[in-house]
Amino acid sequence: MYQGRSFGSIIAGLLLMLAILNPSLADEGLIDDFSRPDGLSAMGTPWRAVTDQVMGGRSEGAIVRRVVDGRQALCLAGEVSLANNGGFVQAMLDLTPPGGPETGLDASAFDGVRLLVHGNREVYNLHLKSTATLLPWQSYRATFVAGPEWREVYLPFESFEPHRLVQRLDTRRLTKLGVLGIGRVFHADVCIAEVGFYRATDGSRRPASGSPSR
């Protein structure tokens, strides 16, 4: 009986380790719903605020968790400046934890990224990085508008354009995800209550435009 319990514990531990090392197994493609008390995403990684100050720019931004219209959310706020060739503020998330697979996260079973967003009617970027984005300025980019009411945004993988690289997005090898205010002088104020991958074949999750008319 003792050996049976030990074997079961070993199996449970191995399954837990597999889920951590291969976050593509996360239930229904969830990346984060900001419900964990430890502040980590479903990938087991923390969000980080990054600005163009890392390259000499003067934009200022920060991330904070707070309740917005009844939803727990991660909010990115700041001032985007083009001074010194800068121009961005970002909330960034690693999609694999330390010690995870060097090949990145495999999201090939999904069709795109789904966000639940709230903001100040400005256009924001969602960037993906993969094992092909070897330089800091390389990424795959899509845009969306965040309005004053919560709404879902669906960004198909094919809508992500390569920036400063020629390879198309390989969804089998994703490494990072970022929400950005970028490219122009403005006040960034965007909140995210959910982020994850979606399947277009799921009738409850139909792809929709990320950038409706403002």
Image (cartoon, rainbow, N blue to C red):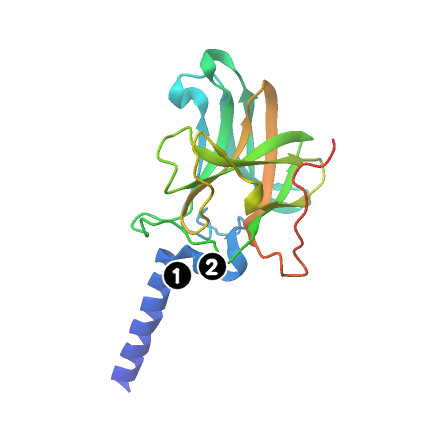
Residue 26's disc is 2
Displayed quadrant of residue 52: top left
- What is the residue that sits farthest to the right in this orientation? 213
| C-alpha gap between disc 2 and disc 1 | 7 Å
Location of residue 188 in the rendering, given as x and y in whole percent from the top left corner = 59, 26
Mark 2, secondary structure of its residue: loop
Q: Nearer the viewer, residue 177 or 103?
A: 103
Location of residue 46 in the rendering, given as x and y in whole percent from the top left corner = 42, 43
Name above or below for residue 164 compared with residue 86. below
Q: Quadrant of the N terminus?
A: bottom left
Q: Earlier in the sequence, mark 2 or mark 1?
A: 1
Displayed quadrant of residue 16: bottom left
For disc 1, the marked residue is 19
Residue 57's disc is none
Q: Nearer the viewer, residue 200 or 191?
A: 200
Q: Residues within 10 Å of mark 2 (few under 14, many from 20)?
A: some
Marks 2 & 1, CB-CB < 8 Å contact = yes
In the rendered structure, the answer to whether residue 11 lies left or right of residue 44 reads left
What's the residue type where badge 1 is placed?
A: Ala
- What is the residue that sits farthest to the top in this orientation? 84
In the rendered structure, the answer to whether residue 29 lies left or right of residue 2 reads right
Q: Nearer the viewer, residue 14 or 163?
A: 163
Name above or below for residue 64 compared with residue 40. above
Q: Residues within 10 Å of mark 1 (few under 14, many from 20)?
A: some
- What is the residue that sits farthest to the left in this orientation? 3
In the rendered structure, the answer to whether residue 33 lies left or right of residue 147 reads left
What's the residue type where badge 2 is placed?
A: Ala
Location of residue 200 in the rendering, given as x and y in whole percent from the top left corner = 62, 56
Q: Quadrant of the C terminus?
A: top right
In the rendered structure, the answer to whether residue 89 lies left or right of residue 209 reads left
